[in-house]
Image (cartoon, grey):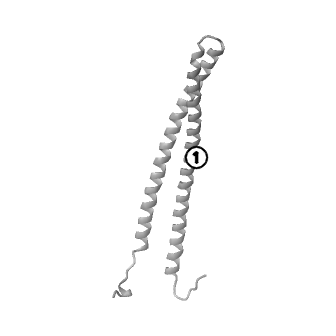
Amino acid sequence: MASIFGFRSRDPARDRQTDGSRLDRLAKLFEQIAAEIEAERVGLENRYRTKATNAAFLVEAMENGSTSDRRSSEVSALTKSILNCERRIAELSRQNGMMKELRHSLDTVFDENTASDSAITAEYTRPAGAGRG
């Protein structure tokens, strides 16, 4: 049977260091994912502008009669691609917002842990008979 007197806890400074390291890794991961999302969004927006411009010129050319009506399938394909781009850009914006919320939540957790550790440390370092306050 194990004795409760043999139980030892880790130094709170070591716990804070471990937690800080873990939170730093999470923060870096969130930042990396946010950068990936942003890079995809920027690239997609560039392609979106190109496709929208091409579609506009093609529709204008068709309206002026300078191209054949068979190019309407090309307009349909460009329209479908533009709509897909718009949906994906909206999804990437939602993902980016979620990454910002998660990052903010991480900061909140770290701040709460720091405040909690400070309160616990103050409680244990208070002189005997000083009361809880």
Comparing 100 with 77, the one in front is 77
Residue at (62% x, 15% y) in the render: 62
In the image, what residue occupies the spot 59% across and 28% down?
Answer: 79
Count of marks overlaid on the render: 1
Residue type at tag 1: Arg
Q: Residue at x 46, y 60 (%)?
A: 23
- The image shows residue 96 at horizontal and vertical percentages of 55, 46
The residue most toward the right is 63
Left/right of residue 55 with respect to residue 39 in the rendered view? right
Q: Residues within 10 Å of mark 1 (few under 14, many from 20)?
A: few
Residue 112 in the image: above or below residue 48 = below
As drawn, the residue found furthest toward the left would be 1
Q: Is residue 105 above or below residue 71?
A: below
Horizontal and vertical percent for residue 104? Answer: 56, 56
In this rendering, is residue 29 above or below 129?
above
Residue 22 at what x, y percent from top left? 43, 61
Where does the image place residue 107, in percent across and percent down from the top left?
53, 59
Name the residue rendered at 57%, 30% in the picture. Answer: 80
Q: Looking at this rendering, what residue extends furthest in the top direction? A: 66
63 is higher (above) or lower (below) than 53:
above
Between residue 58 and residue 76, name the one nearer to us: 76
- Quarter of the image that includes the C terminus: bottom right
Give the quadrant of the N terminus: bottom left
51 left or right of 28?
A: right
Helix, strand or loop under label 1: helix
Q: Toward the viewer: 44 or 123?
A: 44
- Find disc 1 in the rendering and name its residue: 94
Picture quadrant where residue 78 is located: top right
Q: Which is more toward the observer, 44 or 73? A: 73
